[in-house]
Image: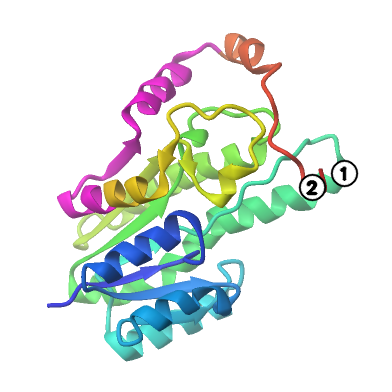
Amino acid sequence: MTLRVFITGGSSGIGFELARQYLESGAIVGITSRDASRLEYFGQRWPDRAVLLKADVRNMVSMKQAAALFLSLHGVPDLVYANAGISIGNLTWQEQDVPVFEEILDTNVTGMVRTFQPYIAAMRQRGEGKLVGIASIAGFRGLPGASAYSASKAAAICYLEGLRAELYDSGIRVITICPGYVDTPMTSENPYPMPFLVPVAKAASGIIRSVETGRLRYTFPWQMRGIGMLLRMLPDRLHAFLFSRAPHKPRRGD
């Protein structure tokens, strides 16, 4: 049976590459973007298997409409990827950054909820399915100048853990993906070194393999996984001291 996949944030970065690799393998893939014109590549190459959906994870109505269309065309997906996310520098004492905090948390956390919610009842009725949330190693400890992004990814990790327990006996697997630095448009503007930067094609293929094998959490690359574990063990005072002079991600308008 043909694999059916639904992916948010498919117009660039990890989402684009996941969609491309699944389509290359013969899957039917629903792909969302706030700007549907940015998905034309998929429609031109795979018009019979790429379902192009204009939807915004910050809008529940548009996510329900996208899900309803995919369900009507191809039935219940086997995999749902909550991939859409944003990262913008922020500073709490800057009043103009308060809406940035709200936007990041709404997109990266509540957007994940809006992605999964329309499919859970149908997956439970079928007794199987996989919900895959793209979190980040940035959720292991708070990063200065990107505290909203770190907070959103920490919240995503905890949300996925809670959802996994809620759906424990349903046949639905909840999978957490924690990338380190991946070479995407999101990271291209970072004005600081990014150790162990992973090419986006390699990142996507690793994610796909981990989902196929049934792992509940996949953190990569292995070097950053080790660094992340060490960071979690740092005493709070030492963490604050070590990161107090770390470079910051650009804020909106910088």
- Quarter of the image where the C terminus is located: top right
> In x, y percent, where is residue 104?
64, 51
> What's the CA distance linking mark 2 and mark 1?
6 Å
Q: Is residue 84 left or right of residue 59?
A: left
Q: Is residue 218 left or right of residue 179?
A: left
Residue ID for mark 2: 98
Label 1: how many Cα within 10 Å (few below 14, some 14–19, many 20+): few
Q: Is residue 240 left or right of residue 6?
A: right
Cβ atoms at labels 2 and 1 below 8 Å apart:
yes
**228 in relation to 38, above or below:** above
The tag on residue 60 is none
The tag on residue 95 is 1
Nearest the viewer among 182 and 165 is: 182
Nearest the viewer among 239 and 172 is: 239
Residue closest to the far left? 1
**179 in relation to 132, above or below:** above
In magenta, the rendered stretch is 208-235
* Residue at x 18% of width, y 54% of height: 212
